[in-house]
Image (cartoon, rainbow, N blue to C red):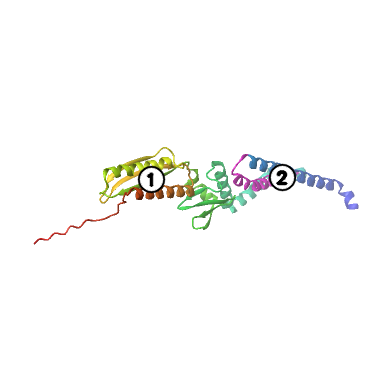
């Protein structure tokens, strides 16, 4: 009891500080919740943005704690200049010790700001390609075609050349079809028309396509086509390509148009 009487001012100050800290944390949590709700409503790829909310909340709480601590220490006669200098030295030491982590944080912010890729995108980074399955403040995780999970530090990702395959609006589809030299002129024209009909009737292909007689090869008459698929992702590209090539094979066989293959004609003569 005597202790409380002799330190009543200190006790009140401690209670006020605790109240201010709790109030500040509640306010930060309130805004954090509102920001999360806003992100979920306005952004389709909200998972990537939401992954940054916890760290931003912790940073805000840490700043509030430092401000409160500095205010209390100043109220007890400590020089603000000395406090700032002390925090500066501590900050430099922490920064030096955790420079890689800080670099990764800035790298993650660069990924977020530049919108390099989103969760679910298919990307290529330094000969590594796969689907982005997770983005944190420290690293980006990529699931490759053979189901291997690769983790890349965000500072490496931010400074690398990134090709976002999923960002491609249209993907080019092309092939060279070789038919035999004994194909008649009528069937040759029919072969070209079949390609045009297949590309025209396919709803997954744009109207911007070309079909033309390319060249007279050593063992084939080559017909080339180029078209653009309306999807950028690899799964749809493979699906449409398979459908187109399967239809070409089916129609050519139906019309009796033979595919060419490398061959040689050998002539034997009897000198006698």
Dot 1 corresponds to which residue?
Answer: 174
Q: Bounds of the magenta span? A: 42-71
Q: Residue furthest bottom?
A: 272
Residue drawn at the location 67% of the way across and 46% of the way down? 57
Of residue 208 and residue 170, the one placed in the foreground of this image is: 208
Mark 2, residue position: 29
In-front residue for pair 146/110: 146
Residue located at (70% from left, 43% from top): 33
Q: Residues within 10 Å of mark 1 (few under 14, many from 20)?
A: some
- Tell me residue 180's x, y (percent): 28, 50
Q: Nearer the viewer, mark 2 or mark 1?
A: 1
Mark 2 lies on a secondary structure that is helix
Residue 99 in percent (x, y) is at: 57, 51
Residue 119 in the image: x percent, y percent? 56, 48
Residue 74 drawn above or below residue 151: above
Quarter of the image containing the C terminus?
A: bottom left
Mark 2–mark 1 CB contact (< 8 Å)? no
Q: Is residue 30 visible?
A: yes
The front one of 171 and 65 is 171
Q: Is residue 68 magenta?
A: yes
Q: Position of residue 224 (x, y in %)?
A: 34, 44
Q: Which mark is residue 248?
A: none
Left or right position of 95 against 34: left
């Amino acid at each position: 009891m005597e202790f409380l009487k002799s330190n009543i001012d200190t006790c009140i100050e401690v209670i006020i500080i605790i109240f201010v800290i709790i109030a500040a944390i509640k306010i930060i949590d309130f805004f954090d919740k509102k920001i999360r709700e806003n992100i979920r409503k306005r952004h389709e790829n909200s998972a990537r943005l939401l992954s940054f909310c916890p760290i931003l909340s912790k940073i805000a709480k840490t700043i509030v704690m430092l401000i409160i601590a500095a205010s209390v220490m100043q109220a007890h006669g400590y020089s603000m200049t000395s406090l700032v200098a002390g925090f500066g030295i501590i900050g430099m030491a922490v920064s030096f010790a955790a420079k890689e982590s800080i670099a990764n944080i800035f790298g993650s912010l660069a990924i977020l700001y530049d919108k390099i890729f989103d969760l679910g995108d298919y990307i290529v980074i330094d000969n590594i390609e796969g689907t982005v399955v997770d983005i944190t403040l420290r690293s980006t995780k990529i699931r490759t075609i053979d189901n291997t999970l690769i983790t890349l530090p965000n500072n490496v990702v931010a400074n690398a050349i990134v090709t976002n395959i999923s960002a491609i609006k249209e993907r080019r589809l092309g092939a060279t079809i070789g038919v035999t030299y004994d194909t008649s002129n009528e069937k040759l024209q029919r072969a070209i028309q079949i390609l045009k009909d297949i590309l025209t009737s396919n709803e997954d292909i744009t109207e911007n396509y070309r079909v033309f007689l390319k060249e007279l090869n050593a063992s084939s008459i080559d017909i080339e086509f180029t078209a653009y698929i309306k999807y950028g992702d690899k799964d749809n590209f493979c699906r449409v390509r398979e459908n187109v090539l399967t239809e070409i094979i089916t129609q050519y066989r139906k019309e009796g148009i033979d595919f060419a293959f490398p061959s040689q004609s050998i002539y034997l003569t009897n000198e006698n």
